[in-house]
Image (cartoon, helix red, strand yellow):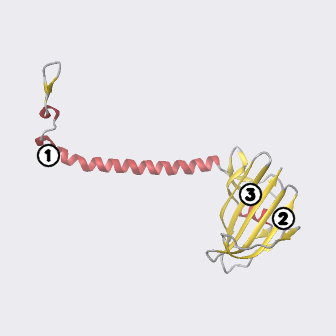
Amino acid sequence: MGSQPGGAELTLDTLGLTGEGASSPRQSVAWPPRIALLALMAVLIVVCLIAASLVARTILFPVTRTAGPPELPRGRCFVLDPYWCIELDERYVEQFAGVQLPPGAHVLESGSWRNLKSGIERARVTWPIEAATPALVAAGTELLSASPGSEFSRVDASWRIADGQYTSTAMMGVGIDGRPLLTVERQWNG
């Protein structure tokens, strides 16, 4: 092939790349442990990433409580900005929706954000089919007419609650999956 400056010739035999060296028992036995080690390393990396995301979520988005009476759990909100939430608590959703949810109710999706002049809190809630329909408990509720949108196959009730700088709009009915559904959005205009 070629020679090195020291005079030794560089060949396939000196590099261990000849046909004899490639089929040696030592090299054929070494591949399965290497593959197992690589697979183990990949699994460990995935496990570490999942654990890190859970730890980061717990540290960055702890359960936050509301400021005034009654002090309710607000949800999982960013540690530096309590108005940026990735999940809202069921009792908090009940408060700003103006309803009392039946036992077994489950918040499917929720969150909130706020900037200097406006903000939104939103939630989608479902409950078992056999449970009673939630009753409106908020004073000053204005009933609205609504037609089914992309989330509803039938709308049973729609209302708005104005409370100072906050306006909540809610729709309750049957979702496209056939389960009871409540969607609520509360806007803040500061």
Q: Crowding near pointer 1: few (<14 within 10 Å), some, many (20+)?
A: few
Indicate which disc, 3 or 2, sits on the residue closer to the N terminus: 3
Q: Name the outermost residue toward the top.
A: 6
Q: Of circles 2 and 1, which is in front?
A: 2
Q: Mark on residue 40? A: none
Residue in the foreground of this view, choosing between 131 and 145:
145
Q: Is residue 105 left or right of residue 31?
A: right
Res 101 seen here: no
Give the residue type that dot 2 points to.
Ile
Question: Distance from label 1 to label 3 (Cα)?
Answer: 67 Å
Residue pointed to by mark 1: 23
Q: Is residue 12 left or right of residue 123?
A: left
Label 1 secondary element: loop
Label 2 secondary element: strand
Whole-percent x, y for residue 17 in the image: 16, 38
Question: Distance from label 2 to label 1 (Cα)?
Answer: 79 Å
* Residue at 78%, 65% in the rendered image: 169
Whole-percent x, y for residue 54 in the image: 56, 51
Q: Mark on residue 121? A: 3
Res 90 seen here: yes
Q: Mark on residue 161? A: 2
**Mark 2–mark 1 contact, CB under 8 Å?**
no
Whole-percent x, y for residue 158 in the image: 78, 71
